[in-house]
Amino acid sequence: MPTAGHHTYSEIITQPDAWAQTLEVGAASADALRALWRTVGGRSLLFTGCGSTYYLSLAAAALSRRHGPPARGLPASEVWLGTDVVPHVASGSVLVAVSRSGETTETLRAVETHRRNGGAAVIAVTCYPERTLAGMADLTISLPAAQEVSVAQTRSFASMLLACQLIVGTLAGDDRLPGRLAVLPALGRRVIEENANLAERLGADSAIERYFFLGSGARYGLAEEAMLKMKEMSLTYSEGYHPLEFRHGPMSMADGTALVVSLVSDRARAQEIAVVDDMRALGARTLAITEAGAGLADATQRVRLDSGLDEDERLILNLPLLQLIAYYRSIMKGLDPDRPRNLTAAVVLV
């Protein structure tokens, strides 16, 4: 195991174990979740968080809009400050507040604002059940196995996203979802083992100066999270976009110093692969993370997930490779991904 950033490395490669605990916690919480939803007359979900957990909220809300109750994902600061959320809260929404630490000030204030504006209830998703957020919630989904020493979120992000996915499935009445997702830990271990060397090559390649991550639907939140991991860990220029939006200006930066990574969906596969082809034609390096490799040009690097799952059910399988690329980029630059510059595990406002 690498010595620099060893906490981050360990947290990335062991995350399938935390996913397994998340599946157990989700199953154990299902009855209480359904009871709360019925009791408060819940009709919609509002996912919120800060930084990584805001991007998680975007992904979770997209999952819910497709499979469960109507949902939105907003930064906790916008919920707290009242920007364009009161009509949503007034509809009887349940706030799902996501915070690894349970102490992020904006998230705690978002909970207070949600209650003050007449929100139906609060569900906390956190890795630390003894901290402030859990005490403010009507129901807490606690994931201690996903706790981290590192500042940058990796296994906590994936585990909390999986917990939100289980919340959506429970409220949608999909009782078979946990059974279908039970294969994720084993699949995650295989994906990490098969692609760790590729991640190291892409992260350690000093000829790559900037990284672009593309994802549609729930994958957009993951693309933004990959962007954030690259910036946090390695201080490298990176951006996240919806795939077809990349043609509308950002592709001006597609050249031999750029790596364009596409989290390919099933629904828009042909159109998303066309974007990859276009960027490669402009000289950019390209990587596609996809369920199967058909339709991709030989010059495009690929990661085949081969999960047999629905594109949303396999969502978190995209994450380990993206996290490892950022980790190895940090190591290549002589940085410590365990302790990113200027950052702390929780932003606590005085």
Image (tube, rainbow, N blue to C red):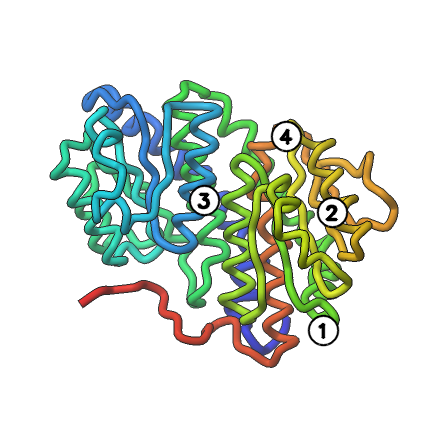
Q: Earlier in the sequence, mark 2 or mark 1?
A: 1
SS for dot 2: strand
Element under disc 4: loop
Three-letter amino acid code at the position of disc 3: Gln
Which residue lies under the disc numbered 4?
309
Q: Disc 3 or disc 2, which is closer to the eye?
A: 2
Name the amino acid, label 2. Answer: Val
Q: CA distance from mark 3 to mark 1?
A: 37 Å
| Residue at x 69%, y 45% (from the top left corner) | 289
Comparing 140 with 232, the one in front is 232
The residue that label 3 is drawn on is: 21
Q: Nearer the viewer, mark 2 or mark 4?
A: 2
Residue 174 lies, in percent from the top left, at 45, 20
Against 39, is 107 above or below? Answer: below
Using a 10 Å C-alpha cutoff, classify the residue at mark 2 as few (fewer than 14 neighbours), some (14 to 19) or many (20 or more). Answer: some
Mark 1 or 4: in front is 1
Q: Is residue 58 above or below residue 69?
A: below
Name which quarter of the figure residue 175 lies in: top left
How many angstroms separate mark 2 from mark 4 (CA)?
A: 15 Å
C-beta proximity under 8 Å, tags 2 and 4: no
Q: Which mark is residue 206?
A: 1
Residue 290 place in picture, x, y as percent:
70, 40
Q: Say what amino acid the circle numbered 4 marks.
A: Leu
Q: Which mark is residue 303?
A: 2
- Label 3 vs label 1, nearer the camera: 1
